[in-house]
Image (cartoon, rainbow, N blue to C red):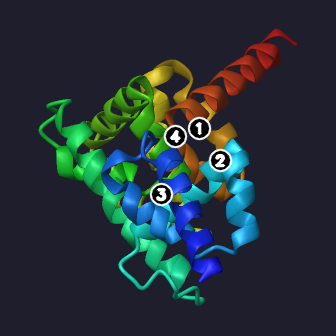
Amino acid sequence: MGDEKDLEALGEQLYDLIYPKHTEIAGKLTGMLLELPAPVLTQIQHDETMLTEALDKALRALQLPQDPSNNGISKKDDEASASSDSLGEQLFELVDTCNTGHTQKITGMLLEQHKETVQHLLSEPSLLEEQVNLALKTLELGVDETDLSDLSDADDIERLGEKLFLLVKEKDAARANDITGMLLEMDTVALRQMLSDHIMLEGAVKKAQAALVKFYQN
């Protein structure tokens, strides 16, 4: 019985720590943390960083459509699927506020990027706006957005070049051919990423422009 009383006391103390941070689900989070070993729980009470990490893990687990006790190999796949759906919904709502008239297509294009990049977009309105504008410009140029991250091998170099040329032309029409040719010397993975990463493309174009200036000066 002593152990049960200790656990109950720990639970009450944990609840008091969790409640200010996650009021609506404090009870559920407390119950999840109480599954941890008693010594760990005691340490969590006195270590803010450890408490935050434990809460983050519990919050991620709550997003999964599965039994929290299931820590099998499929967990990562389920987590990715669930979080992707959640990210997609959040992104759709934010993109919709931009009134582009292409909310669904643009959301799909942005979701082709890495999960971490998408999460960053959700917390950085200015970066999201920049990416939405780039996606809109891509749509207006007639670039096939469905293939941005699904290209492969030699036959696709030409397609990559065509798509890059359209984007580079917007930045430097006079030297678009030369700059595109220089960019195509890069790794295909980097090229694909540039098609959806405005900042990366901008940096690559500037480097190519600088190299061309040096070339013509010599």
Amino acid under label 2? Leu
Relative to 193, residue 132 above or below: above
The residue that label 2 is drawn on is 184
Distance Cα–Cα, label 3 vs label 2: 11 Å
Pinpoint residue 204: horizontal percent, then vertical percent: 66, 32
The residue under the point 73% across, 65% down is 40
Pinpoint residue 191: horizontal percent, then vertical percent: 60, 50
Residue 114 makes an appearance in the image: no
Amino acid under label 3? Arg
Distance Cα–Cα, label 4 vs label 2: 16 Å
Distance Cα–Cα, label 4 vs label 1: 16 Å
Marks 3 and 2 close (CB-CB < 8 Å): no
Of label 3 and label 2, which has the lower sequence position?
Answer: 3
Marks 4 and 3 close (CB-CB < 8 Å): no
The residue that label 1 is drawn on is 180
| Along the line of sight, the residue nearer the viewer: 173 or 2 | 2
Give me the disc on residue 197.
4
Asked which quadrant contains residue 98, the reply is top left
Distance Cα–Cα, label 2 vs label 1: 6 Å
Marks 2 and 1 close (CB-CB < 8 Å): yes
